[in-house]
Amino acid sequence: MRILYITIGCAKNEVDTDRMRALLTTAGFGEATDVEQADAVIVNTCSFLESATAESIETTLTLAEEIAQGVRSVPIVMCGCVPSRYADEGLADELPEIAAFVRHDEEDGIVEVMRSVLGLEIAPCAPCGVLRTVEGASAFIKISDGCNRFCSFCAIPYIRGRYASRPLDELLAEARALLEGGVRELVLIGQDTGIWGSDFDTPSSLAELLRAMDAVAAPYGAWIRVLYLQPEGMTDELIAAIRDLPCVLPYIDIPIQHCSERILKRMNRKGSPQQLRELFARLRAEIPGMVLRSTAMAGFPGETDEDAEELEQFLVEQSFDYCSVFAFSPEDGTYAAKLDGQVPEDVKLERTQRLIDIAEQSGFSATASHVGEVCNVIIDGVEQDGDGFELIGHTWFQAPDSDGVVHIEEGEASVGDIVRVELIDSFCYEMVGRIITEG
Ligand code: SF4
């Protein structure tokens, strides 16, 4: 029985799909690369934004239509955020094409679900020996799920529930399995990675996890990267761990969303421009040469022209290496969707564009500042380039799937290799390099 996996949304969803794939592979299911070969389809959905929910449902319906046109009866199973958010609101009646809905916290039971929809005898699952099925040199590890922050614009706490850290032993076992399988970069993700361990009976910390992970990664010469930290999670202990542990990259990702104290309060987030300034100054002083990524949101309800300008000035001043920009989207069931002072769509888009322009100006020149450096590059794959092909990789200052890549113009290597590369040029967020052999 072969299953086609379709994932919509962020890296956290990719990890969940991979976990289901690992469970199903262990239970004897194969994988299909297209619907023609598939006996069943799993669509792992995203519902972070209204547009993601729409994309998830459209993808599923298009698939159902394709299957119907081919007159094949291939069950579709919808997993993840859409069922988690809407299962209690009559989703099954609205989408009769779907054979089963699996909420995010039911995904460990995916083998039983697939056996049931395929009419196979339900047998107990053998112990799962395969933890992940990642191919390639970088792998995401989800260290927690859920979130307790309840930012007023965000539906995640309602979809994924309260913050829950994954146990240390489980994370280290997953890291070891990935490294043994050839992975050379572990990217730690979660909704709020900085508070990992704080919910344990005996509380722990992200710094403690990084120290343990560093010991596991060191024999393989692997990299550890942490994404999705929050400003308040940046303790002295964590800053020291990122600075001092040899495998942990000096790459810091802290979404700010806004800098105006008034808007941050309406967002149910803490902080002020001064506190954010102090934090970034402290990080730059403590971890020289680090790379800083952030996220900013335009057009939050109540944002005045002055607030928008304050945020623009803040981005100019901080000159982040990377900054993702989003326009506020009023999400069903969130507090911010009902707030007064909703910003007209055209104003929101203008403000978003201005922030994007600033982010690009800073980001492109930060990228260009690396020209001339020689650094290690992980080879991720091969891409068509005109009539030929070129190797694609990424450096310590480029997070996979978020930032730019290195286009290798000269030299040979295989996917998964870590090679020395001279960075000879850049364009936008992309670098151009050539592999060098050091004597
Ligand atoms: S920190 Fe805020 S934006 Fe991020 S997942 Fe939690 S509630 Fe949502």
Image: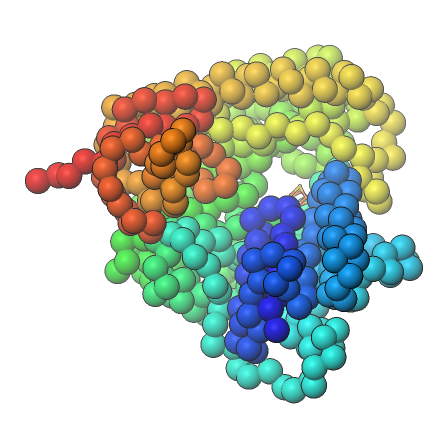
Q: Is residue 58 above or below residue 81?
A: above
The quadrant of the picture occupied by the C terminus is: top left
Q: Which of 432 and 107 is in front in this view?
A: 432
Residue at 38% x, 42% y is 382
Horizontal side of residue 275 vs 399, given as left or right: right
Q: Nearer the viewer, residue 197 or 33?
A: 33
Horizontal side of residue 80 vs 174, given as left or right: right
The residue furthest left is: 439
The residue furthest front is: 70
Q: Is residue 390 above or below residue 350?
A: below
* Number of dots carrying numbers: 0
Q: Position of residue 22 (x, y in %)?
A: 53, 68
| Quadrant in which residue 346 is drawn | top right
Q: Where is residue 396 in the image (x, y as percent from the top left)?
A: 35, 39
| Quadrant in which residue 312 is drawn | top right
Q: Which of 2 and 244 is in front in this view?
A: 2
Q: Where is residue 163 in the image (x, y as percent from the top left)?
A: 65, 56
The quadrant of the picture occupied by the N terminus is: bottom right
Residue at 83% x, 54% y is 86
